[in-house]
Amino acid sequence: MAIKTYDTLAFLSRFMTPSTDLDAQLRPEPGQFFIVPLETMYRQVNRRVPPSRSLAHSCLLITGGAATMTIGFDTYTATAGELLFVPAGQVFSFGSDDVNEGYLLHIHPNLLLGRHAADVPTMEFEFLTPWGNLLVRPPADTFDALLLLTQRLLTIYQAQGIRSRPLIQSYLTTWLCEVAETYQPVSVTMQTAAYRLSHAFKTLLTAYVRTQHRVTDYASQLNITPNHLNKVVKETTGKSPTRWIDEALVLEAKVLLSQTADPVSTVADQLGFSDPSYFSRLFRRYEGVTPIEFRRMIDSSGS
């Protein structure tokens, strides 16, 4: 069974209280793009959002207060003057009690394609990838420029919605390039062969985590020895390939446990574990609770 990935309308329906204020600000085809004041969106969150995925990128531009989200295996808190990115397809969760101001941009990857979009491939915007620095604090003058661009995007969107796609793409491209100009990559040696190899490993991991749990599986696909893969990934990311694999499996498990009622043994089987007890031990090692206890926590939060 595939992990559910929410489209925009399904996500709003499940986790947001119906609101004429929010409805009035959303234009047709919100799955492709929308921009709203952050406080308008957060006021409607009626429960803690459990581990989930979206088909689109999201960005929070914070002008006041704070927003805390768990993205992947890390928890981030963005405050005034900062940007927080949630790449499309990445696992995220957040609570309903944050108080903040700013803007939420919701961008489907398709919107970044076409003659009015960036000439630079989307993957070169590292902050739109799961392995990028997702919390960005640009210099004050760059943040001010981004704020002006954001407010202009909001004006265009409110007036014309996605019908003004070429204009939205042009402003959005400028917006992303402004971020990229001051963005600090995860690795200052990102152009090295080691970084490219580490990137290739994480790309394979995203695609095969359910069926390949051993470092040797990925080393074989990359035509290198397991020892070399261990050395390169640890040097460039600070984590061993084994930890990357374990964390990816636990993330997949958290989404399945929160979105389905399948028995833990079934969840384990879907993730390629022949021994449910080993799966439960692995989960507890990283989360501090068993899969059953985690599901009870999700249920008690009203999800």
Image (cartoon, rainbow, N blue to C red):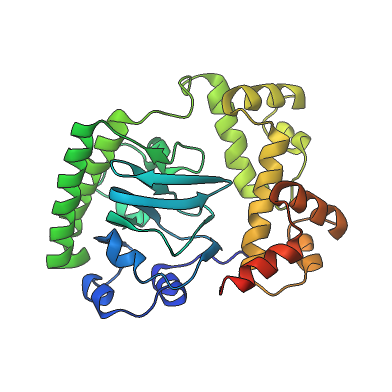
Question: In the image, what residue occupies the spot 55% across and 33% down?
Answer: 199
How far from the left and from the top, in percent, is residue 77? 43, 46
Q: Nearer the viewer, residue 75 or 205?
A: 75
> Of 33 and 196, which appears nearest the observer?
33
The image position of residue 187, as x and y in percent, is: 49, 25
User: In the picture, which quadrant includes the C terminus?
Assistant: bottom right
- Tell me if residue 31 can be seen: no
Residue 42 in picture, x, y percent from top left: 35, 64
Residue at x-position 69% and y-position 75%: 261
Badge count: 0
Which quarter of the rendering shows the N terminus? bottom right
Say if 11 sits above or below 278 in the image.
below
Specify whether residue 207 is in view. yes
Q: Is residue 300 above or below residue 290?
A: below
Q: Is residue 125 above or below residue 108?
A: above
Residue 127 picture location, percent across and down: 41, 39
Q: Residue at x 35, y 45 (%)?
A: 79
Residue 154's place in the image compared with 285, above or below, is below
Image quadrant in which you'd find residue 225: top right
- The residue sitting at 36% across, 72% down in the picture is 44
When asked about the image quadrant of residue 295, the answer is bottom right
Task: Give the camera-side residue of 2 and 186.
Answer: 186
**Quarter assignment of residue 240:** top right
| In-image side of 227 versus 188 (left or right) | right
